[in-house]
Amino acid sequence: MSFKKITLCKLNSEYCPTVEVVEDGRVKIGEAPEFAFLSKDQWNLLVENILSNRLSKLN
């Protein structure tokens, strides 16, 4: 994975949800204290679904 941490809004990670690759290789999504963790395989499946247009923007 090429990223380590991105913020999901225009503020900073103190105020917004983040997506972060943690040391054990899982992907942590959310904001404190509510986080979800995806395994590498789950993350890759999510990315595949986005790139193949099976998932798209919500209206």
Image (cartoon, grey):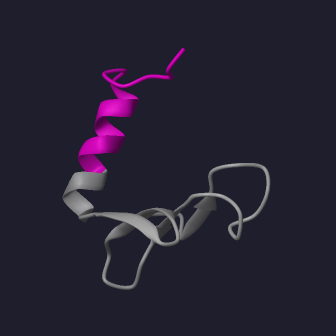
Residue furthest to the left in view is 41
Residue at image coords 79%, 56%: 11
Residue furthest to the front in view is 33
Q: Which residues are magenta?
A: 44-59
Residue furthest to the bottom in view is 23
The image shows residue 36, relative to residue 9, as above or below, that is: below
Using the rendered view, name the quadrant where residue 23 is placed: bottom left
Q: Is residue 54 magenta?
A: yes
Image quadrant occupied by the N terminus: bottom left
Residue 14 appears at what percent x and percent y? 70, 70
Residue 16 appears at what percent x and percent y? 66, 58
Q: How many marks?
A: 0
Q: Is residue 11 left or right of residue 43?
A: right
The image shows residue 10, relative to residue 38, as above or below, that is: above
Residue 57 appears at what percent x and percent y? 50, 23
Residue at image coords 50%, 20%: 58
Q: Is residue 20 magenta?
A: no
Residue 55 appears at what percent x and percent y? 36, 25
Residue at image coords 78%, 50%: 10
Residue furthest to the right in view is 11
Q: Is residue 45 left or right of residue 58?
A: left
Q: Is residue 14 left or right of residue 52?
A: right
Image quadrant occupied by the C terminus: top right
Taking depth in this image into account, of 43 and 35 the one nearest to the observer is 35
Taking depth in this image into account, of 19 and 51 the one nearest to the observer is 19
